[in-house]
Amino acid sequence: MAGPNEAVRVSDKVYWVGAIDYNIRDFHGYHTALGSTYNAYLIKGEDNILIDTVKRDFSEELFSRVSSVVDLSDIRYIISNHAEPDHASSLAMAIEKIKPEKVFASKIGVQNLKALYGLEGVDAVEDGKEVKLGGVTLTHMETRMLHWPDSMITYLAEDKLLFSQDALSMHLGSSERFADEIQMDVLEEMANRYFANILTPYSQLVLKLLDKVAAIGLEIEVVAPDHGPIWRKDVGRIVEIYRTLALQKPKKKAVIFYDSMWGNTEKMARAIGEGVADAGAEAKVMSLKANHRSDVAGELLDAGALLVGSPTLNNNIFPSVADVMTYLKGLKFRNKSGVAFGSYGWSGEAGKLICDMLESMNVELITDPLKNRFAPDADMLETCREFGKTTAAKLEEMVRDE
């Protein structure tokens, strides 16, 4: 293992020179429970090349790692695959220290680097063109909206290494640099959470990218993403994981999330979950007092049903539930059925408002909202259980039709 702030060798010509952020817990509203990494890479060759930088707060960590391999002044080129601040907010500092001959980015990247950081004189690379640079062979491919318009990936032919940028990434901050040093169940869970909360709206673009790379016939022995561990063994596994996630095929699984003022909506949620499970489907019953919005998104990706429980407050959806619904709507999940349920005291508008939101999210409504005034009695709880069984039957139908 490398010492503090030392580079880590990835392949014959490539070193990891990024930074580990053990403590970040919020990324665009997504709860990053295990932190993250900001991966940058150094290609050491006839002329040294820096691939991406890091979040500005970690710039000294980047410079220290680079300096453990080469002098900063010995870097001739910098390639920016993505202009987002977690990868490029220290780029101006790097340019000032390194004084590279050239800085490269995608065509839109050139525009974004100027708009975000005032950087002038960045050269645009041509999409899909193989170029010789610094004694190595590089191919840049635009990956627009994965997950910014300027995004691109870079392939290093000599080491059969793909700098995959935000694609094939995950938010996982650990001292291990390589995927084969981490338990597969952890990798799968973190990939699922990352995809669900970052890339779900662009699932079709992910599939197109994977197909494009396969069609080109690139030999890939190492996948070096911008977040999370590097894949140097069984690289097909992360590609397979991403393809499965992007397809969004529903399982016999219902996500039942809710909040509750006095415990009445919670009783309904638990009874619905019992009905789903009794009928042979998986029920994820999630109180928003114990689960973050990104936890719900992570569970929803492979679920076929979304059941939303909310009391009515001031003729409206309960605030915590409205927050999650707004978040989920932006993620554009596909292949879902669902409905609303909840307890109310005076008017009970929350159920209809939630169902309206579900329809705007292209969620197929299973039935009308399930509502109950005040505390649910034994009959209502039995109705909730039966509703859970109806949901399970709908899930069976959805899975069969896939």
Image (cartoon, rainbow, N blue to C red):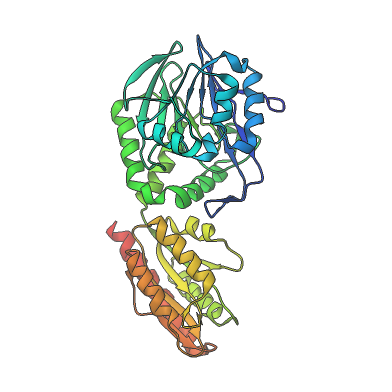
Where on the picture, by quarter, is residue 250?
A: bottom left
Displayed quadrant of residue 286: bottom right
Which image quarter holds the C terminus?
bottom left
Q: For the point 37% across and 40% down, which residue is it?
A: 149
Q: Is residue 188 left or right of residue 137?
A: right
Q: Residue 215 at what x, y percent from top left?
A: 28, 30
Q: Is residue 182 visible?
A: yes
- Number of disc labels: 0
Examine the rendered structure and indicate whether residue 341 appears above or below residue 39. below
Foreground residue, 99 or 171? 99
Q: Quadrant of the N terminus?
A: top right
Seen at 53% across and 61% down, the residue is: 293
Residue 205 coordinates in the image, percent (x, y): 33, 43
Residue in the image at 43% along x and 55% along y: 301
Q: Position of residue 178 (x, y in %)?
A: 57, 31
Q: Nearer the viewer, residue 53 or 40?
A: 53
Q: Is residue 194 above or below residue 268?
A: above
Outermost residue to the right: 4
Between 91 and 3, which is closer to the camera in this rendering?
91
Establish if 361 lies above or below 83. below
| Location of residue 150 in the rendering, given as x and y in whole percent from the top left corner | 39, 37
Residue 258 in view, yes or no: no
